[in-house]
Image: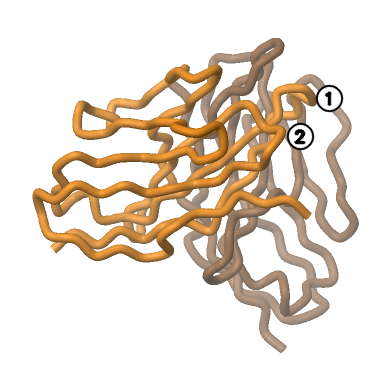
Chain colours: A brown, B orange
Amino acid sequence: AQTVTQSQPEMSVQEAETVTLSCTYDTSENNYYLFWYKQPPSRQMILVIRQEAYKQQNATENRFSVNFQKAAKSFSLKISDSQLGDTAMYFCAFMKRRSGSQGNLIFGKGTKLSVKP
Amino acid sequence: EPEVTQTPSHQVTQMGQEVILRCVPISNHLYFYWYRQILGQKVEFLVSFYNNEISEKSEIFDDQFSVERPDGSNFTLKIRSTKLEDSAMYFCASGERATNTGELFFGEGSRLTVL
């Protein structure tokens, strides 16, 4: 069975600073996806960034980037130039890759990020 | 931009009552999911649905739970006889098979309070 662990329940960062959220996972699978989802207060979860396990290059999306260490089963999220709108709960998630179909997401407990002005 | 919508946003019910939570997934999506999040705990997978049948379910999804896609647009989760421990936020999600990106699109959730 897959597990996802986020060891930081809460974090805070000053506006314009950089913050890194940690995530580790455990799986025996070789082919999978990893995700970071963001859930602003009272809003739905939205995808921040996605990494395919077979790709060595770390994914980036504007101010968001990941440090994917497959051997260590680590998948951290770096947010650069933090903005007030980044305040949210961040969930790390794992999905086993299946050819031609969708799997289901296994989530971590989340990290509550507060960006302070 | 298309989005997943859920109703009701909040429902309060008495223990033992039946509850139906409704979801309208994104129209061209083929995979549908229910997840739940008990306060302070992680988001947990309940069930996935594809081609008008359950494709996978977790241990949480026991005989008290059922899902249905009655009219080709709505996707419902029914809890037959609610228990106190069913109090949680329930999230619906949908996914598009064609891209096989793994990305799921979530609704805002339905908060269920069982008294």
Q: Is residue B58 above or below residue A93?
A: above
Question: Residue B9: percent from the left, percent from the top?
Answer: 43, 64
Q: Residues within 10 Å of mark 1 (few under 14, many from 20)?
A: few
Q: Which residue is mark 1?
A: A55
- Marks 2/1 in contact by CB < 8 Å: the verdict is yes
Drawn side of residue A33 relative to residue A83, left or right: left
Q: Chain of mark 1?
A: A
Return the residue found at the far bottom.
A117
Drawn side of residue B43 relative to residue A37, left or right: left
Q: Residues within 10 Å of mark 2 (few under 14, many from 20)?
A: many
Question: Residue B104: percent from the left, percent from the top?
Answer: 64, 38
Residue at position x 70%, y 30% from top? B96
Residue at position x 72%, y 81% from top? A14
Q: Is residue B80 above or below residue B83?
A: above
Question: Residue B19: percent from the left, percent from the top?
Answer: 25, 49
Camera-side residue: A70 or A103? Answer: A103
Tell me whether marks 2 and 1 sit on the same chain.
yes
How far is mark 2 from mark 1, CA to CA? Answer: 7 Å
Residue at position x 56%, y 62% from top? A89
Q: Which residue is mark 2?
A: A51
Q: Which quarter shows the N terminus of chain A?
A: top left
Drawn side of residue A31 relative to residue B72, left or right: right
